[in-house]
Amino acid sequence: MSSFTKTVLFTDLDGRAKFREESLALTQGSPQSLLTELFESGGYQLRHSPVGFRSHFHCTTTPQWVFILGGQMEIGLQDGSSRVFLPGQHFYSADLLPPGALFDPAIHGHWSRQLGADPLVTLFLRG
């Protein structure tokens, strides 16, 4: 493996949240421990969401990594598609409200919810 796959939740030119995959080169470290470049971070938060949690449509306010520590998280988009993230999985949330736009829940953002029998536990790491 010479790259790390970064799943990105982003705002496309039409103002709608979408997913894309990006590759980050593993150019540092050693053959036994390949690393990307060192990135800056701006703090972190831990979240516990009970069984049954579901948000409304919203945009990310600050780009951040989302790591699933426990439970399952589903992210839904305006086009009706969704992705489920399991413990140990992650994505980069950067679906910001377009500059100058007023939030419209019929166009912008994503929703998230807890799935399964276990509460959702996440780590948010600001990018």
Image: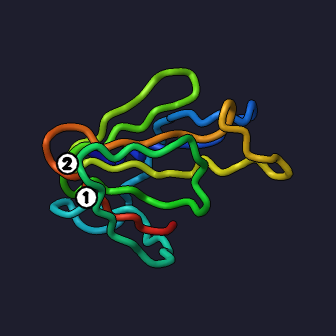
Task: Tell me which amino acid carries mark 2.
Answer: Gly
Q: Residue furthest top?
A: 80
- Residue located 22% across and 58% down the image: 69
Q: CA distance from mark 1 to mark 2?
A: 6 Å
The residue closer to the viewer here, 87 or 102, is 102
- Residue located 24% across and 43% down the image: 72
Task: Tell me which amino acid carries mark 1.
Answer: Val
Neighbor class of circle 2 (other Cα within 10 Å; few <14, some 14-19, many 20+) is: many
What's the colour scheme? rainbow
Q: Secondary structure at mark 2?
A: loop
Give the image location of residue 96, x and y in percent. Answer: 65, 51
**The image quarter in which residue 33 lies:** bottom left
Residue 45, compared with residue 18, is above or below; it is below
Q: Is residue 51 left or right of residue 41?
A: left
Neighbor class of circle 1 (other Cα within 10 Å; few <14, some 14-19, many 20+) is: some
The residue closer to the viewer here, 63 or 103, is 103
Q: If you read the primary sequence from the N terminus, does the residue marked by circle 1 or circle 2 appear first?
A: 2
Residue 22, compared with residue 24, is above or below; it is above
Q: Secondary structure at mark 1?
A: strand
Q: Residue furthest bottom?
A: 43
Judging by the rendered image, the residue that carries numbered circle 2 is 71
- Residue located 60% across and 49% down the image: 59
Asked whether disc 1 touches disc 2, contact meaning CB atoms under 8 Å apart, the reply is yes
**The image quarter in which residue 1 lies:** top left
Say the numbered circle drawn on residue 105: none
Say the numbered circle drawn on residue 121: 1
- Residue located 66% across and 37% down the image: 105
Q: Residue furthest front?
A: 52
Q: Is residue 78 left or right of residue 69?
A: right
Q: Residue furthest right?
A: 100
Give the image location of residue 50, x and y in percent. Answer: 25, 53
